[in-house]
Structure formats: C-alpha cells, structure tokens
Image (cartoon, coloured by chain):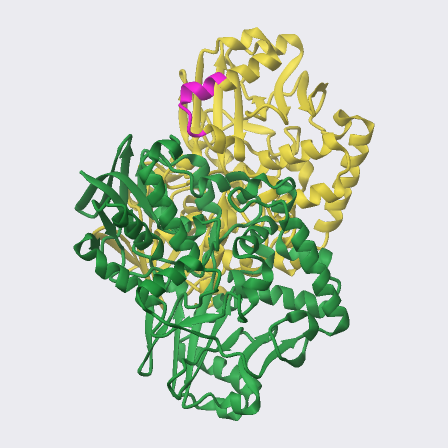
Chain colours: A yellow, B green
C-alpha cells in the first residue's frame, strides 16, 4: 500500500509531494486530471515568448515561492513602474506617480481612503486568519457584503467607485457577492490592502519570473518522475480508518492517506464513500470561484514609456482593467497584461477571442494613443472554460459561509487531508498560499493523530 | 423528429407535458433521472399510512395545484388548528390561539412586528416578481442580507430571534446567507409574509391531501404512458437552431425543442454543447439549494389535543422546528410533521435516523409531555441525500446574484426553455410555482419566435 495519494498537480499538490520526498516519505503518487501540471498557472505563447496565462506575480513576502524559484534558479524582474500610471474614476482621468489610490482621488477622496483603510484595519485587528470564524464580531461581519460596507462607510463617490473596482480586481467577483468577513480574512492573510494592490516593493504585483512562473511546476514535476500521473481525473474516493482508494475510470490507487488539492468548488465532481461531513458539503455548495479573463498584448516596443507612462491603467469604466507593463528586460518588445474581472469577465466570455481583442485594443488606444492600434500579438485565457479550474484566481465566500462552515475548509476527514490555496491562512488565493497549504497537509500526514478528526 | 424533450418528471415537467398534450402537441418524451416521478415530492410509509416526504401543503391561492387535485379527485383537509400553539422564543414559552407571531412576543415585540412587516411591505411595493432586478433599489437590496436587515430594523431581541427562525423555516437557509432582494421577491410571489407563515385559511400550510400530494404526480405520469422514461439521467445536451439532442449514456433523443426542469443548482451535471451563456452559468454557480430534513412521527392518537394543544411548535431553541399536527381526519392516529431547517438540517445530517429520532422525541416530550416518549413510528427524509435534488425546498439567491443574472433563470437559450419552481414568478419555491413554470414553458414552445433569445 502506498503512503499517500496526492490529488492534483498544481502548486499545492507538487509542494506536498516535495515535502514528503524531503522527509523520506517518497511512497506517493500525484494524480492530475489534466494533461499538464501547474493548476491555475499555465504556459501560453505570445508570439515567440512564453507567458503566464494564470498566476504570474510574486510579492517579496511570498517566501516559499521565492525559495522555490531560488532552488530552481529561476530569476525575477520587477513590474515596470517608471513613469506615470493612468487612473480613471468617475469619468475623470488622472496620472499618478505611484499606485496609491488615495491622493489620486482629490482631497476628499484621499481623506476618505485613509479613513476607510483605518476602519478596515480596526475590523481586521482581532481577526486570526487561522480561525476567522472566531472574530468577536464574526456573525455580523459575515452577514455583511463588501458592497454594503462600502455604501455605509465611504461617502465620496469617486472613492466608492474605486473601491468597487479594486475589490473586483482582487477577488474577480463583485463586491455585492462577497462576505465582509471573508474580505478581511483575505486581506489580512496577505498583509493588508496596500500589499495586495501594490506593484511597488513589497506589493503583490512586484516581481515577475523570467520565462514565467508556470515553469516552476514543470520543474517540480520533473523531479517526481513517474509518480506524477497526468490525465487521471478522480471520480470516486472511498475511505476508512487508515486507508483511501481513489478511482479514475477503471484505474485505482490505494494508500494510507490522501491529500486532496482540488478546489473546494469542484469537490462535488468526486463521489466520496462514505460521504463527507454535511457541513463540509455545505461549504463546497456555497463557495464560488472567481471569474477572470486574462489577456496579453505584445507590441514591437513599449512605446508608452516614451510618453512618460508606465503602462498601468486602472479604470472604473473600461471593461478590461487593470492593465500593466510586464515586459521582460533584455528584449525589445512591449508586453501588456490585463484582466476582465468579475462581471466583466462574465459579460465578455461569450464573445470570440477576436471580438475581445478589439475591446482590449480600444481601451489601450483610448489611454495610450493610436500606436496601440496595431499589436504584434494578442492572447487571452478564459479560466471558467478550464474544465478543472472553472474560474480564477480563487474561490470567494458569500455571506454567512465562513463563520458557519469555515473550519471545514482544511480540517482532515479521517485519512483525507485538504490542501489548495483556499485552505491556506497565509496568502490565501495566491500561489504562495497553495505552496504553504501543500506543506501543511504533508506535515499533517506525518503526524496524523495530532490533527485528524473523524467525519 | 420529436416535438419536445422534457427533462425532469417533477410537477414542472409533468405540467409541461400535460399542457402540450391538451394543445395537441403530443409529440414529446419526459426524461427522468430517478426511478420515480414527483421530483421534490415523494411518497413514504409511516407505519401503514402513505405520507409526503417532500412538498405536501396547499394554499387556497394555489389555484393550479387545486385544479390538478380537483380533476384527479384528490380531496383536501385542513391542518389541525383547534387549540393552542406553542411558541418558544428567547427562553420563554407562550401559548397562542393563532399563528400570528406579533402578539405572542409581548407589546414591544408585537409593535416591532407590525413595523417590520410595514417596512417589508414598502420595500416590496415596487417589486415586479417577473423582473425583480428592475426594482428601483435593486442593487442596494441585493447587496444586503436578510440578517443585516433584521439587525438594522428590528430592535426587540425576541422578535429578532423569531424573525431569524421563521426565515430559516421558509428558506431552509440561514438569514445571513440570503439576499434581501431575493427574500422580498419570494415573499411577494406568494402573496406576502403572512400568507407564507400561516396555516389558517389563506395560508401556505392550510390544506393537506388525503393520501398525499405526491400521488398527483403518479396520476399525471400514468396518463402520459410510455412517453415517460424513468432512469434516464441526462448527461449531455447538444443544441442548435431548431434542434436539441439529449443524451443519457448511450441513449439519445432529438426534438425541435427542449424544456429543462432540472433545478438550476444541478445544471452543471449536464454538459451543454455549445455552452450556455456565461451569465446563466454564473447564476447556476451561485444559487444554493436549501437544506431541509423532514420528519414524521406517529402516535396512537393525537393526545396533545386533549390538553388543548393543536400540536404546532415553533421555537428558536429546538433544533427540530416547526412541528405541526397533520393527522388526516377519518382515522384515529396522531401524526406530527416537522423539519430541521437550514444549519439545523446540516448539523443533524451526519447522524443516523435513530439518533435524529431521539432528538425529535426529546423536543416533543419537552413541549407535549411524557406521552410523546413512545411513538408508533418515526420516519425522516434528508433531501440533500437525494441525488437528483440535493436539497429542498428550493434554491435561494445569495447577495448580488438576482440583480445581476436573474433574467437568465427563465430566458430561453435557442431551442431550450427552462422550467422548475425556481423559474416561476408566482409561488416560487412551491409546487404551485413548479406547475405554473411548466405551463409557461409549454406556452413558449408553442410560440418560440416571440420569446426565444439566442445564446
């Protein structure tokens, strides 16, 4: 009998495998539904350059991802920030030196931003990301949507609009759908709102990888060799004390433990026997995967830099926002990356890629000028259409979910342990969270008695 | 080629079939996943009496259900209401002559109830149940949870607790999870809160069927004969202008139209080619099926009546509530029916039926006395465990869903029309809504050009 079945070869599953391997527990298989590893990171070709169709950035505080890149000798470069960013809120366009939203919104907007941030900070203060449901005001915060909070706490019209736009870019979902408790949990797990929205030093959009983040997963998988099984979607898991069997069609694997890294929103594609605890099923029934359409545009050179712009466009009007300059140094092309997020992703998903490219290019022309009319290449990725992710970046919690069923996200069920970025209490929703969740699940497998609860 | 494929043999599908048949459009098949018809109505045996494990009551304003019962000569009887009901809120037990909550909650609670009702009435006033997203304040109402509304508008502690309990009994979900806009829509579609909570004349719990509501579906199916195919779960639907093919394993059926009555929360079990509009998928991804565990208890006689009680128990403390006396006249047994709703259903689902029966009997003994200790029979139904319903009574909308994607609930997609109680704007969530939705979809099939939109 194998030691451990790892379901999913994204960063969570591969990190779990790496952790087990390091500890000498090499008796495992990694079972992946797709014909590739990497999960919500993925390689695409933009012209002749490999690019990230999924997760791509690294914040300096993402130490596990940094360690991984270092051991694999994959180098980073910073997002291009010299020059001015373009901000458009409430019909007004402003240029800014940095990404700070406050000062760009006028005096009232700026003061409002400071007050809103302070209020969020106060609400976050007693929140323990390992147990957000234990927040002293959890029930009330979890019964409130982010949009309700914005309506009640932000008087300035421009700032309200900016806050909604920023929320949609972070969660790939509309503020009216997201629990305030979950919002606070997500922010705090990454170090706060400023970290999440920034591309400056310390920010979540600070560093990029030469050759792409996605390649790290291939390198990790290569080290695991034959133990990674692609094209093995698991449709059933049977479990009992000390044993788990996973089935993929006629094939099956049995081990003492399992680490399941499938997104919580997709666990209903697996039939568990016996059934999972009902509260865990309720959690899966209620979490929702974000909606993101990511696009890349390549130009013969980053012409916007010549006009003193850094390529950043954040707008409450453009359907495709934010947009950033992520051109790798050491080559002459200009590369912009951007997103349709939340309802904009939903609204633009039924189009053809060509129709979407026209909309993106219209946004670029409006803000960067006529030179944006003729890109060398356009590429986009609709994450809802990825059968084994069904959305990006991560799952969010609607109201009343985290406080009631949150503990079931990562609590082991008999011999089954749970990983995936949604189960992490540090950088949840990011690749860093995925890596840490895999390490944590591997540690649980090592000391099951300390952690396992029965169904 | 057939005229119409009807997917699902609940009341929506059977009513669609009956409507087509009456119009002379008899070229259809009804494809049902289960080995029975009836959907979220179902027959069970309590001792030697057939009872309804699902939908069971009829309000006098449910005219289509009444017509159906009349043509099938199935007679009704009223819920037993003579004597006093037991209400327990905030630790205090009171007896009441009627079901009205207000007067039972003391002077302040009573006034608070009137004010809350008036406020809900004002919010409902401009709501058109055919287009709730067109409410002038739709965005704000849809960004608010019912629990937020309760916190802001009900000062009295007892009344707040009563309101939360009543909401859970109506929606089988916690108030913190439900959009206020959806709540208002649901209430108005049935004629208001008083209608929904009442078993008096005019109320949703007023009338019961001799032999059970479930039998109507079997009678309808019998009239359709060989055109009803049981054990035919549809896993794929291919569609284009003027044609639809539905596949169940190796079998397939092709027709000019389809009427799909599968609950919106379960449409992801069918692969549509081409895909459904993304906004419709977003709707399905976000709606949540309610959680209900229904139980029946049989005694040798309705002994509580001897103590001047009518068997109704509504409590914010008991896990199993409400409970009502539904003993059919013309026999001597005493029959109580009750529910674990919302989180109580979730909390009690992992138990055995025997463990649950002990909890129910403890509640009955606490309120009705020691005579409740020894029932003749106990029966319960966990609706989440029904593979083809995955919950009951109906789906609810978390915040930010109805206002954004609501129009996609019933808008046709090419030749595919949508029915099921969730798509109805009259008595949505009830059998009446299911019947009307089937009739409406059948009417659409008759005049497709007037209604169909392309994907």
Say which quadrant the N terminus of chain A sits in: bottom left
- Residues A426 and B21: in front is B21
Answer whether residue B320 is visible to the viewer in this image: no
Please state the horizontal and vertical placement of residue B144, each as a whole percent of the image: 64, 49
Above-or-below relation of A298 to B317:
above
Q: What main secondary structure does the magenta stretch of the protein show?
A: helix
Above-or-below relation of B301 to B165:
below
Residue B418 belongs to magenta span: no
Answer whether residue B243 is visible to the viewer in this image: yes
The quarter of the displayed image where residue B72 is located? bottom left
The quarter of the displayed image where residue A5 is located? bottom left
Please state the horizontal and vertical placement of residue A236, each as a whole percent of the image: 30, 55
Please state the horizontal and vertical placement of residue A388, each as a whole percent of the image: 37, 41
**Residue at point 76% right, 35% down?**
A113
Name the side, left or right, on which A113 lies relative to B387. right
Q: Which residues are magenta?
A: A349-358
């Amino acid at each position: 009998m194998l030691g451990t079945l790892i379901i999913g070869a994204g960063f969570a599953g591969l990190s779990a495998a790496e952790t087990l391997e390091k500890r000498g527990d090499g008796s495992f298989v990694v079972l992946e539904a797709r014909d590739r590893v990497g999960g919500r990171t993925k390689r695409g070709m933009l012209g002749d350059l490999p690019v990230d169709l999924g997760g791509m950035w690294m914040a300096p505080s993402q130490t596990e991802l940094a360690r991984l890149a270092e051991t694999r000798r994959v180098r980073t470069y910073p997002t291009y920030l010299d020059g001015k960013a373009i901000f458009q809120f409430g019909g007004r366009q402003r240029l800014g030196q940095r990404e700070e939203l406050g000062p760009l919104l006028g005096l009232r907007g700026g003061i409002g931003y400071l007050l809103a941030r302070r209020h969020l900070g106060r609400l976050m203060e007693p929140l323990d990301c390992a147990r957000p449901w234990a927040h002293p005001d959890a029930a009330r915060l979890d019964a409130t949507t982010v949009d309700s909070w914005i309506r009640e706490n932000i008087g300035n019209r421009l700032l309200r609009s900016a806050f909604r736009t920023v929320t949609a870019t972070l969660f790939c979902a509309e503020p009216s759908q997201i629990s305030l408790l979950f919002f606070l949990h997500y922010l705090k797990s990454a170090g706060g709102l400023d970290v999440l929205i920034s591309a400056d030093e310390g920010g979540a959009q600070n560093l990029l990888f030469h050759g792409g983040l996605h390649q790290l997963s291939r390198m990790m998988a290569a080290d695991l060799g034959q133990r990674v099984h692609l094209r093995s979607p698991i449709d059933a898991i049977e479990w009992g004390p000390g044993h788990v069997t996973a089935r993929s069609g006629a094939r099956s694997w049995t081990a003492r433990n399992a680490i399941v890294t499938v997104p919580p929103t997709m666990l209903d594609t697996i039939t568990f026997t016996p059934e999972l605890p009902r509260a865990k099923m309720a959690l899966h029934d209620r979490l929702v995967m974000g909606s993101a359409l990511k696009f890349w545009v390549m130009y013969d050179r980053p012409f916007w830099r010549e006009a003193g712009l850094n390529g950043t466009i954040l707008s409450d009007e453009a359907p495709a926002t934010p947009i950033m300059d992520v051109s790798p140094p050491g080559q002459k092309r200009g590369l912009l990356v951007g997103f349709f997020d939340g309802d904009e992703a939903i609204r633009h998903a039924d189009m053809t890629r060509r129709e979407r490219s026209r909309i993106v290019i219209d946004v670029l022309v409006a803000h960067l000028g006529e030179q944006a009319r003729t890109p060398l290449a356009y590429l986009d990725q609709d994450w809802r259409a990825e059968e084994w992710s069904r959305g990006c970046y991560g799952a969010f919690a609607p109201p009343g979910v985290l406080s009631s069923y949150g503990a079931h996200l990562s609590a082991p069920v008999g011999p089954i342990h749970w990983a995936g970025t949604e189960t992490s209490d540090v950088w949840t929703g990011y690749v860093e969270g995925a890596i840490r969740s895999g390490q944590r699940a591997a540690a649980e497998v090592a000391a099951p008695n300390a952690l396992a609860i029965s169904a």
